[in-house]
């Protein structure tokens, strides 16, 4: 992947992080709750304890914008601020990961992501 494309993808992650955190703050969300829940999506990595294929499925479910979008839709339809808050924290986490270069995982290896290889490759 070219450096320009990688830069754009990381900038999109930064934008998602900043916009999500800004809207969360504007809605009156508490920063302690934000801090406590910010890393919760990383619990999806537990799937790797079983095997790389399940790990990739679980990780991708926890690190796709589809989940926060669904929660936001529930919040909009139900009028519940808690759903909005959770969606924004989740979205901010995904944006932060993308900013750092962590992408959705391929089942071949934890470091194989849609943003390119992340981390050291195993010695053969």
Image: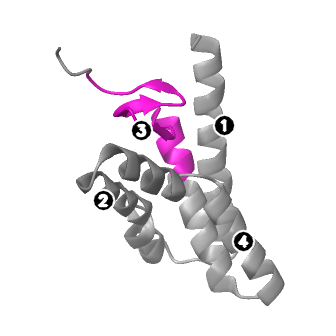
Q: Quick one: SS at disc 3?
A: loop
Spatial CA distance of label 4 from label 1 is 19 Å
Task: Identify the residue position indicated by label 4 in the image.
Answer: 72
Q: Is residue 20 left or right of residue 119?
A: right
Residue farthest toward the left in the current orientation of the protein: 123
Quick check: 113 above or below 7? below
User: Mark 2 against mark 4, which lies toward the viewer?
Assistant: 2
Quick check: 121 above or below 74? above
Whether 111 is among the magenta residues is: yes
- Dot 4: few (<14), some (14–19), or many (≥20) neighbours within 10 Å? many
Looking at the image, is mark 2 or mark 3 earlier in the sequence?
2
- Dot 3: few (<14), some (14–19), or many (≥20) neighbours within 10 Å? some
Q: Quick one: SS at disc 1?
A: helix
Please report the bounds of the magenta region as a residue range.
94-120
User: Mark 1 against mark 2, which lies toward the viewer?
Assistant: 2
Residue 107: give its label: 3
Check if mark 1's residue and mark 2's residue have beta carbons within 8 Å: no
Quick check: 111 above or below 95? above
Spatial CA distance of label 2 from label 4 is 25 Å
Spatial CA distance of label 1 from label 2 is 27 Å
Looking at the image, is mark 1 or mark 3 earlier in the sequence?
1
Task: Identify the residue position indicated by label 2 in the image.
Answer: 46
Residue 12: give its label: 1
Spatial CA distance of label 2 from label 3 is 14 Å
Spatial CA distance of label 1 from label 3 is 24 Å
* Residue at point 74%, 79% (across, down): 74
* Residue at point 30%, 59% (across, down): 46
User: Mark 2 against mark 3, which lies toward the viewer?
Assistant: 3
Check if mark 2's residue and mark 4's residue have beta carbons within 8 Å: no
User: Mark 3 against mark 4, which lies toward the viewer?
Assistant: 3
**Residue 13 location (% of width, % of height):** 60, 40
Looking at the image, is mark 3 or mark 4 earlier in the sequence?
4
């Amino acid at each position: 992947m070219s450096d320009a494309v990688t830069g754009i993808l990381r900038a999109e992650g930064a934008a998602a992080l900043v916009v999500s955190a800004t809207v969360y703050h504007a809605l009156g969300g508490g920063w302690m709750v934000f801090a406590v829940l910010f890393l919760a999506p990383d619990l999806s990595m537990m799937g790797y304890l079983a095997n790389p294929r399940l790990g990739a499925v679980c990780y991708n479910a926890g690190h796709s914008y589809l989940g926060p979008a669904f929660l936001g839709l529930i919040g909009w339809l139900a009028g519940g601020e808690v759903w909005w808050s959770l969606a924004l924290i989740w979205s901010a986490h995904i944006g932060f990961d993308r900013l750092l270069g962590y992408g959705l995982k391929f089942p071949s290896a934890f470091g194989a992501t849609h943003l390119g290889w992340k981390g050291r490759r195993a010695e053969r």
